[in-house]
Image (spheres, coloured by chain):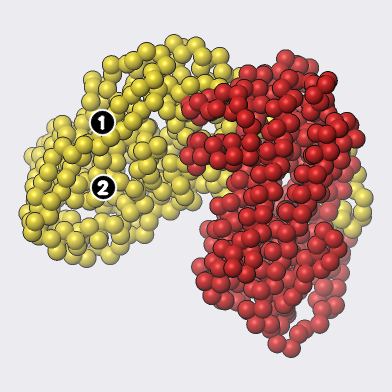
Chain colours: A yellow, B red
Amino acid sequence: MNKIRWESRILAAILVALSAQQLPAQDLSRLDAAAGKALFERNWVAAPASTTAADGLGPYYTARSCAACHADGAGSADISALNLVIDDPVYGHLLQPRAVTGMAAEARAQVTWNTVRTELLSEGTVVQLRAASVTVSEWQYGPSSLPINLRRAPALGGLAALEHIAPDRVQLLADEEDRDGDGISGRLPRGRFGWTAATPLLREQVARALSADLGLSTSVFGGGEGDCTAHQATCQQQVHPGEDPLEAPDTVLDLLLAYLRTLPAPASPIADSPGATLFSELGCKACHVPAPDSAQPQLRPYSDLLLHDMGSGLADAGPAGASEWRTAPLWGLRQNAGFLHDGRARTLDEAILWHDGEAQPARDAYRRLNADQRTLLHTWLLGL
Amino acid sequence: MLRLIAAGSLAVLLTSCASNTAVPPTPPPASDVVSTYIDIARASYGDSLEAARVLDAAISDLLENPSQASLDAARAAWRAARIPYQQSEAFRFGNPVVDEWEGRINAWPLDEGLIDYVAPAYGDESDNNYFYTANIIANPVVDIGGISVDAARISPELLGETLHTIDGVESNVATGYHAIEFLLWGQDLNGTSPGAGNRPYTDYSLTQCTNGNCDRRRDYLEAASALLIADLDEMVQNWQDEGAAVADLRAKGLEGGLATIVTGMGSLAYGELAGERIRLGLLLHDPEEEHDCFSDNTHWSHYYDALGISNVWRGEYTRIDGRKVAGPSLEDMIQSLEPALHAEMSARLETTQLAMTALTEQGEMGNTFDVLIASGNTEGEALINAVITALMEQTSTLEKVISALQLQNVSIEGSASLPEKQ
């Protein structure tokens, strides 16, 4: 390595002055968030490329970048941003619609939405509830008979703040046996993140997304093959180990987290608005607990972070699918495009009318509201 | 002792800047400042287009008569083409017409394995067992992003339209300056040691073809160059009086126009340059986490980015033919309104310029950006940190300028939470 030689004494002096001036830690962490945002928006490319830090995509993948599905940290209901969960022994957790250059995708999937139920609300408001059906062709390893369940990309604002809610506070809210007899039996999940709260730490959730959605290995989920199984020979052959065994080293993971931590939880609106009162009166608060950690009343995700049975209409198809869902935090609702885990609900009317199971009484109460009351509630919810 | 010298020279700099400047009696009208900004944008893109045409001519020479000399000439033309283009990057942020277009011509990282042969595992110099299979140059039909593409004829349309839309918003990895750079230099397989890419000129020879498919490689290079010209021409049109970028800017009003100017200056300096292009590379120690990774021209790219920011501030741009475009500027406004703040900003920009000059001096001595960010290169790290600090300080002073002008709705890329410095 060449030794640095300074051409000019003045330059040297300036540089010494600058580097002696310690970079303030706080400023640097903000710059790291900027670097993390760049990684969040980066289009990853297939290995081997000249850039070891930005290659390793795939071999199968759902998106090339985080921002493809979470632009500016917001959510997406774009069909191309939906995860196709199949949990198949050959195809792996996801059915991937894309593959690196030179490989065919695992299959081609087409999502169509069909109206499954029509409801009439007061004053003649007709609400059509739709559900997805997925048609798959061009299976690369033979057809799978397992059902495909969809997951949409949620908005990410406030995500990091959920980590600050103490586990024992969440435990206090749990009532698995419904001892208080209110018909609601929140079950303590394994973790906190994801639609079924399966992941305890945000770091793990990010690593999971890097692995499953982009096909990037991390210290949490190793293996450059991403979501390709031992049965997928063409995919396994594509894995080219580079200098660094991890396609997304810890620095990348840390920078992404630094960025996510700057995505704020939206500011809470005034609590005593008419919409808030309706929310409370309908019983929504039983699960969408405004501030689940009483020691931190400023953190208002509107979720108890527990699992609830939401009825068979929302449950996944197939034995491995989810039948219980984490109460979705409502803060930042407006940053989401589409509602519920698969984006089937286009409006708040639809989202609320899909509620069933433990939420049935609250939904029935909602059906009795008049149009003005519904508008008040919607306006308030979209201000969260 | 060194610290004393350093403090002394900084003080000299600050005083010289403050005392050499004549204070204009009244600030120029904002409309004139915005007009100067548009003039410089038009000239910067015009020069970028002109330089791309010179590059295209050099590429034609290379294809007509492949030799080391014609390849070297094409490489020199590529480096020259980066000079006006990098200065134009100060117009990217704040002007959606530019930002949305930018990915087509300056996208990074480049999916070079999609374009041409690459070494099987990066960094393994001894391994000449090239990975030929999955690239457009080698394959008339290729699967891209899970879709089968007919690439029998390599044309600007194939690159710009088919590949551009094939993977939704996520393409733009096969065109632009870096695609041409890759085709002229090839991969830089030197890791964090000195040296750039070393593609043989015979990769373009029809009679002594190396690495296969020279005819298709020639087509690709020609198409990428034609597309670059077309894309730059589109941007030149956008900055004419009736163009989309000018119309957008005018629609924002005068305050909105000034806000656009500072948004571009701050976003390029902070989030883009200090954050993504410099600090990220330093943290990852990735030898190719550098903007112009095949040619090792990154130090000049950064230098001209910084100069572009300064151009916009000073309302003055020196064209590639030496003519000057100049007019009333943001600097003039601040000089008249807040002389002390003007002195501070001048000193900040000068410090950045000096740090960037040091970067280019090192680069020209073989200590290119990829060498400086190597793990354990403490002097390199100090130099890079000096550049980062200078850009950060420059942007905090810019925040004061934004306050002084009472500009609203300025969002600087990467610094939604830039520390408030009172």
Quarter of the image that includes the N terminus of chain A: top right
Of marks 1 and 2, the one in the foreground: 1
Which residue is depicted at the point 17% across and 34% down?
A313
User: Which residue type carries mark 1?
Assistant: Ser
Report the front residue among B47 and B85: B47
- C-alpha separation, residue under disc 1 versus residue under disc 2: 16 Å
Residue linked to disc 2: A346
Which chain does tag 2 point to? A
Q: Secondary structure at mark 2?
A: loop
* Rendering coords of residue A339 (x, y %): 28, 45
Residue at figure coordinates x 70%, y 58% from the top left: B45
- Which residue lies under the disc numbered 1? A133
Tell which subunit mark 1 falls on.
A
Does residue A200 appear to the left or right of B262 in the view shown? left
Q: Quarter of the image holding residue B15?
A: bottom right
**Spot occupied by residue A295 in the image (x, y as percentages of width and height):** 32, 51
Residue at screen point 55% across, 27% down: B150
Q: Residues within 10 Å of mark 2 (few under 14, many from 20)?
A: some
Count every numbered label the image shows and give the total.
Answer: 2
* Amino acid at pointer 2: Arg
Q: Quadrant of residue A141?
A: top left
Is the residue at mark 1 from the same chain as the one at mark 2? yes
| Residue at point 79%, 20% (across, down) | B210
A196 left or right of B189? left
Residue A24 appears in the picture as rendered: no
Task: Judge whether A226 appears above or below A128 on screen.
Answer: above
For residue A35, side relative to residue B169 (left or right): right
Residue A261 - label: none
* Residue A15 coordinates in the image, percent (x, y): 81, 54
**Which is nearer the N-term, disc 1 or disc 2?**
1
Q: Are marks 1 and 2 in contact (CB under 8 Å)?
A: no
Residue nearer the viewer, A215 or B347: A215
